[in-house]
Structures are given as C-alpha cells and as structure tokens.
Image: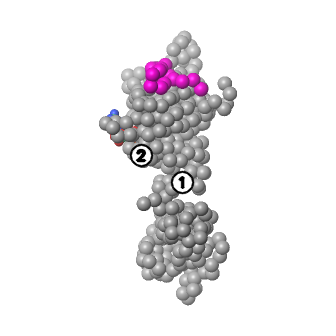
Amino acid sequence: MSKSVPRLEIRNLRRAFDGRPVVDDVSLRVMPGSVTCLLGPSGCGKSTTLRMIAGVEMQDTGEIYVDGKLICDTVFRIPPERRHIGLMFQDFALFPHLSVADNVAFGLKGAREEKRARVEELLREVGLARFIDSFPHELSGGEQQRVALSRALAPRPRIMLMDEPFSGLDNRLRDEIRDLTLDVLKQEDAAVLLVTHEPEEAMRMADEIALMRAGRIVQQGAPYNIYNAPVDKEAVAFFSDINVIRGKVQGALTDTPFGQFLAPGVPDGQAVEIVIRPQHLKIDFDRGGRGPDPTPQDGVPARGVVERARFMGSESLVEFRMDHDGSVLKATVPNVFLPSPGKALWLTIRRDRCFVFPVVE
Ligand SMILES: Nc1ncnc2c1ncn2[C@@H]1O[C@H](COP(=O)(O)OP(=O)(O)O)[C@@H](O)[C@H]1O
Ligand SMILES: [Mg+2]
C-alpha cells in the first residue's frame, strides 16, 4: 500500500440532531503512523465525528474510507466490529474480574501461545511486563490507562480513535502517559485520530491539528502553522490569552497608537483587529516620559500604567491600563518581573508576531 493513500479519510460528513447540524461538512485525512488531533471546545461535534467513524453513529451524508476503500456512506455500511478500528475513551473501564493479560487479550483471536506473545509484547512496550498476572485493582490509574491502551492496540487496529483519553489522569502523570502512548502508537504504525479540547495536548501529540468549531473544521495544519498562522481571532484565542487593538484601514495600512500596521488586500474603511499574544508585547522603561525610540520591528511605543503584576511560575503577567484609551493590555515576560501598580512603562508590539483580521460584523 502506497504511503500516499490515507489510512483514514472522511469526506463531507454531516450529522444533525433535531434539525440542528452538529457535524457540518467535515473532511479529514489521516496517514499511517501519524496522529491527527481533532481540537475544539466542548460541544463542537468532536465525539460525534469519532462515533461516526467507529460506526456507532450514522452520518446523514458523507463517506468514510479506509486505505482508499469505502467503508461507509449512506447506502453501504460495514458494521463497527468489522472496521478494524481501535477505540479508547476517557472511561476506559478494564474488566475488573480479568487479569491484565486477559484484559489485553480480550479482543484477540488465534492460538493461545500467539495471544500470549502479543500480550507480552504490548505490556513490554508500555512498561508493564511485570504486571501481566495482576488484576486491575492492583494498578494505579496511570498503569490502568496503559493496560487499556494495550488492549485497544492488541488486535493491531489500522486506525485508533481516542476520545479525550487522558483527561482522567492527574497532570504530572498525564505528560508521561501521553509521551509513552505516542511512542507506542508510532511503533504500531496506526493512524490515530485523537479528540481533545486541550490545546497543549494537541500541540504535544499531533502531527496535524484540525481545529473544530461549531461542527466545522476551521483550520487544519501542523501545530506550528496553526499556532503561528491562525485563520481568525478565535483561533488565536483558543491557544492563549490575547490582546486586541482596533483600527480602520486606509491605503492597506491601519494607524494605531502603536504605529502603522500592514493590512494587505483589506479595502479602505474596513475595521480590523490587531491580535497579539501577551508574550509578544515588549515592555520598556519610561526614560523620563519619552519611552523607547520607534523601530521598524516594534513600531511606536505607547505608554501605560501598571494595574497588576503576578508571578506565574515560569513567567510574570503584567496588566497595563493604556494612556491613549484606558484599555487594558496584558504582557507576559519570562522569569520574575513585578513592577508596582501605578508605575508608568511603555509597550511595543512585535510586527512579526501580530495578526491583523478584518472585523466581521
Ligand atoms: N444522540 C444525540 N442526540 C442529540 N444531541 C446530541 C447527541 N449526541 C450529541 N449531541 C449534541 O451534539 C453536540 C456535539 O456533541 P459532541 O459531538 O459530543 O461534542 P464534543 O465531543 O465536541 O464535546 C452537542 O451539543 C451535543 O449535545
Ligand atoms: Mg466529546
């Protein structure tokens, strides 16, 4: 099978409940050995999409292909148990009365020794070989999760669907399990579609992120591109706090207290929002009321007064009340920087890190 044929492809999937579209024209491709994250807020239709691929929910329209072959449209439908799709959900519920070995072997067919060998292989991969004859209640949450992963992978599914599988784990454990899961999934060469509402999880796990909102995929690409070339203000805001500065376009430029910003292709008179993440505002000193000199990279400085400064661990968050319009802007800086409230400082905006979007009324 050529590497260029997607392991999983969905085309134009739609599903409405009571006349309300919940999944609205969703198309996706997932290659073997790669992880695609379906990322979006709660209720945007992620689980419904996954359930249609698994075959436990029927789409209204659209098709699903595995290795280029149709497995489901509105007429033809391969039942869930014959799709060779692995599933893993948050409440993964191991069988309490079965040993770890029997849990992992649950979906396996074939000779005893073969099954045992596969179980041993998987438990080695997830670092649980020593627990092969233990029972679920003897394992920690993280260990149980690894057993569940082994169970889902045991029959060598060509596709693995994971729905918020890590949300039941505590933070520290979660990072470790995410990395391990990723290693094992790559080793098994499955195509993975992972659903999450957490941007950090998607950034950490995904080769490709499909950003979903209100039933639609609004942007798709590598994590770096999604973060650094977002399609709209909401896409920026999904990954971090944002600052928004409003302006109007004249001659493909918009004038602001921070200087001019390029707005290529935007018609005259159009209102725009300049969106900037707190880590891309630069703070500078007052210099007796003059502030720093303008530069092409950082534009014109604008003065503000510190409202609040908080230490967040690896960075400090400083909120400013701006002189020019009384708006509040947030800036983060690495390490400890805790200026007193009332102190005047100057802010500049890095041109290469801001996003200019037309305002859609
Ligand atoms: N069987 C169903 N009947 C009616 N509404 C449903 C059903 N399943 C999901 N929904 C609705 O569809 C929307 C999307 O749900 P879901 O796919 O679970 O979102 P997500 O997984 O992104 O949180 C929600 O508003 C949910 O209430
Ligand atoms: Mg869900």
Question: Callout 2, which amino acid?
Answer: Ala
Mark 1 vs 2, N-terminal side: 2
Q: Which residue is mark 1?
A: 231
Question: Callout 1, which amino acid?
Answer: Val
Q: Which residue is mark 2?
A: 214
Residue at the outermost top position: 111
Q: Quadrant of ligand 1?
A: top left
The answer to whether the residues at label 1 and label 2 have Cβ atoms under 8 Å apart is: no
Q: Which residues are magenta?
A: 68-83
* Badge 1 element: loop
Residue at (60%, 51%) from the top-left corner? 225
Residue at the outermost left position: 18
* In front of the other: 353 or 341: 353
The percent position of residue 49, horizontal first and vertical second, equals 45, 35
Quadrant position of residue 19: top left
Residue at (56%, 80%) from the top-left corner? 285
